Amino acid sequence: MTQTGTERFSADLFQSTALTKKLHLDMGLNFVMINDANNGLQLSDLNKLLPYQQLQDGNGNYIPQPQTFYQADKDALFKSGYPYDWSFNLLQEFRNKNNITQNRNLTAVAGITYLLPKGFSFNSSYQYENYSSTNTVLENEQSYNVRNQVNFSTAVKNGQLVSGLPKGSIYSLAENHLQTHTFRNLLKFDNNIGSDDHNLSAIAGLEIREVAGKSSSMVKYGYDPSTLQFANLDYINGYTNILGTTSYIRDATLFTDIKNRFVSVFSNAGYTYKDKYSLNASARLDKTNLFGSSDRYRNVWLWSSGVSWQVHKETFMDNSPFAVLTLRATYGINGNVDKSTSPFLIAKVAKDAQTNLNYGYISNPANPLLRWERTAVKNIGLDYVLTGARLRGSIDYYDRTSTDLLGNATVNGTYGFNSAYVNYASMRNKGIDVALTALIVKRPVTFSTTLNYSYNSNKVLSVDFPNPTVGAYTAGIAQAGKPLNYLYSYRWAGLSSTGAPRVYDKDGNAVDYKKEMTNTSALVYQGTIVPPHYGGLFLNLGYKAFALSTGFTYKFGHHFRVPQLLYTRLFESVNEVHKDWGNRWQKPGDELLTNVAAMPSSQTGLSVYDNYIRNADIHVATASNVRFNELLLNYTVPKTFAGKLRAQQITLTAQARNLGCTSSTRKR
Amino acid sequence: MDQTTAKEKSNGFFGTYGMDLMLDDDLSINEFSQTYYKTNALNAFRFAENIYLENESDADWESMYNQVYTANLVTAQVMNSSGGTTAEKQQLMAEARVHRAYAYFILVNLYGKQYSATATTDAGVPIRKGIDFEEQLPRASVQQVYDYISEDLLAALPDLPVTPVVGLTNRPVRAGAYSLLAKTYLFRNDPANALLYADSSLKAYSTLLNFNALQPNPSFPEVLNYPQNFRNPEMLFEKSGPMISPIVYTNTALLSMYDPVADLRFKTYFFNDKAFGQNFGYFSNEWSGRSAAKGISVPETYLIRAEAHARLGHAAEAMQDINTLRANRYKLGTAYMLSAADAAEALSLVKAERRREMAFRGSRWFDIRRYNMFDNDNITVTHALPDGNFSLPPNSNRTVLPIGRKYIAMNPEITQNPR
């Protein structure tokens, strides 16, 4: 059957052995295999359908849909002797899909731990991971791609039709392999120093990691799935296609080989006094071959430090309602590096389709100033459990300042590129996270609930390539002093007497689309598109062997632009027509009844026309929503019965996901 | 540098400008073909104040400056690169210089005023020297840009191979560099130097393709099949413009300049759209993959030399070049020879031949600016659209394209052209 689906198989083995009293050996093996069939339709496939397009007639025959050439020409060509019927039909495509991916992942770990005197221990471990995937796509002679490619390669030569490509199925095979070796050595210390009042635990470690990826792919024409034979192709001499131009068969064979190495040195030390007051510090140095230009960018120390106080262990808390009350504070520097970029110019080599020659091209311009993204994190937190454990939770406040954020920044195209992946901004994030779990009923029914709540507010502090234009504001491009992912809109001034969109300028005058707004103060700020308030609510109900749990998530306070009827698209294609088409301005007076602009009579100024509609404040709506994410029912089989099957525990689970969503469609 | 299509961050060296077609009078737009044009192209066709919105990219500008980046990278680093012989490196260096010179020649003619007596004070385009993203980008004067072009071309000449190789016409050769030099001098109204370099170019390579040898297109037999640009033996230095629209109708005034039977260019360049069920007329169909090459070619070099001769008063020499070209364009056995009574007539015959030969080849727009500036030809371009007529008087401000506002917003030292 044609569908999209997944099968999964996994196995796990783990063995822990004490070879001597002081020498321990751990070994493990994990294997996962996932088979994916990707034969469904995408939304984009459906978008290709014309309004009222029928897929089949009354007798179940496919009705051709427009694709590539004019249908009458295609029919005539087929009649004149072209290899294949050239009609396209979405249902026929869907029925002939055959796209399968198999993923396999093997992880093996081995480690020894040697206990040294006086609280020291040494651990050395090695992990090997081997991932491979195989993707096969078989396009048979029913699929449009085969028929189109072969027909397109066909032309009249000396009175005969000659095809550059052989008839038959096209078979594509892609293999991907990834091997990771990780070697890690740890020296640990955990002991009291002097008296029982002083406890010190510390780790120093060295990690070496190599990630090696290889992939290969090929495409075979004229493939026969029963004999596994395929056609020999001429990649060297061109052929004449239907347009009379010389084409070459592109050899789609592709090899990639990528290797990345990482070395990290890290240490972590914690000191606890009287089991109540703790100090903690950690540091890490990462070296990679990703940064080569200077040690300044290659060697980065990342560190953090923290203090904590277990207040409930103090004598003055003896009669308090808290079973646990801990205060924490940390400060540190985190780092992040993106492997897709490099300080060096990256050039790649490919084969040109027209000349069949190799050429080099720039895939990444040189950026000698590339550096790590760094984030300074301040965090204060509180953990608590009330006596009787009926109520527990935590509260955290954080303040993170990120500098040298990496992203695709708009750069001046005069430099040769209109965007570049660079360190382009710095920003500050502040927020709180609250978690609360309450055990409401204990017996005979247990009922507990967990509520998570988070609040985040952020602000971009600086931008390296500022772009403070109206277009950048309405597109949401980062601006200093504004949150990331903000919404700025035109102030809608209603339709003109001819049905054209109008917006207010900075002085409050209604302006026609013929005048393009260039002053950002004419725009209105409408919040952000990411939710400042979000979290989840989980309810758990238990009775004897049954457990029922539900999960809800919520997001509040963000907004989105509701897609509108835009005419630039309508001038180009009529595949999708917005439902507002029927409500558009059609005659004088309609401007009092509708905000849907008239179909413009000419394309003059059409980009501004559509921009005023797309980015109008009245088309921004709240995106707040509550989702019923999960419902889980568990039944634990009685131990006596499970014992007969030599199982420790057997659980039957029924699960449903994405059960519903409520949202407000109210516009601002 | 053999790249024909844009990929990731690089546009390729085949790419070049396209907006000129929307400004000149080779093309016409009707109600049917109008829907195939993007708003930006129609803005240019209407000679609007702005072609692009303030946050939109200008494809021509970026295509040319992308080539400048790569050329700068090569000229700065190729000599210190590892592997390869010194001669190979010198050749790559020279090729990069020619690509860069070509890019600036196009940029200064799209975004700067036509070269004239005020060239030293007229604003040209920014000359980007390095490859970093922090360089200041003030506009050099038109004169400075032309001087930079000449400097690059003269420096490149000794290290270039002399003649083009069919199938590799995108790689600059000496005959092409000479021809581009000749063209820049023609654009500077310096016919003596234009003659000198056009002559050097033709001495190095002068192969013309005889259109009598062209075969009919296998699918559309009424069209003569012109070789793909990179396989065309007439091509000295190939550049292909972007596809402005899949359907480009030809202005009837241009069509009327051809002898539809004897002049084989007519059947080669144009195509009646009756086969598609339309009845509007002729178009140069990019749809068939026959997009016109905009680089430097042998026929253009003949036209440059002919024009230089005519401007220097050598009517007979001018007509000799024109007739050499026409002999390869007209049907065997038909009368192709033209003659001129004086240099003035020779010049006007050269101009007409240039228009016929170079139609849709990126020449007409620049020629209109040139003729209006140097010869007072007084050509007003009028574009008709279903919603009205749009006219561009000679030498008016709007004969210079505006610079994308996006670039000015990011680097305010780039000044805008008055509109």
Image (spheres, rainbow, N blue to C red):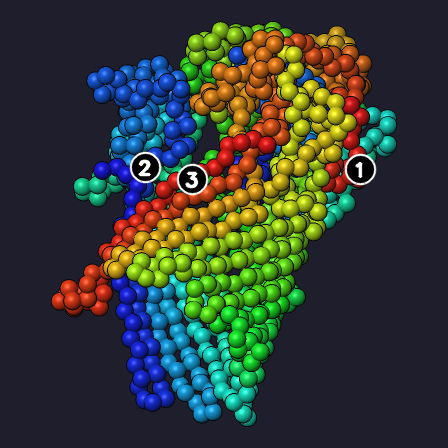
What kind of residue is marked 1?
Ala
The residues tagged by marks 1 and 2 sit, at their Cα atoms, a distance apart of: 57 Å
Q: Chain ID for label 2? A: A
Q: Mark 2 points at which residue?
A: A40
What kind of residue is marked 2?
Gly
Q: Which residue is drawn at 44% across and 83% down?
A: A122
Residue B100: % across, % down: 68, 39
Residue A243: % across, % down: 42, 23
Quadrant location, the N terminus of chain A: top left
Q: How crowded is mark 2: few (under 14 residues within 10 Å), some or many (20 or more)?
A: some
Q: Name the residue under label 3.
A: A661
Asked if labels 1 and 3 touch by Cβ distance under 8 angstroms, the answer is no
Asked if labels 2 and 1 touch by Cβ distance under 8 angstroms, the answer is no
Residue nearest the viewer, comparing A57 with B243: A57
Q: What element carries label 2?
A: loop
Q: Which residue is drawn at 19% across and 66% down?
A: A639
Q: Quadrant of residue B127?
A: top right
Q: Residue at x 46, y 88 (%)?
A: A119
Residue A538 visible from this viewpoint: yes
Q: Name the residue under label 1.
A: B140
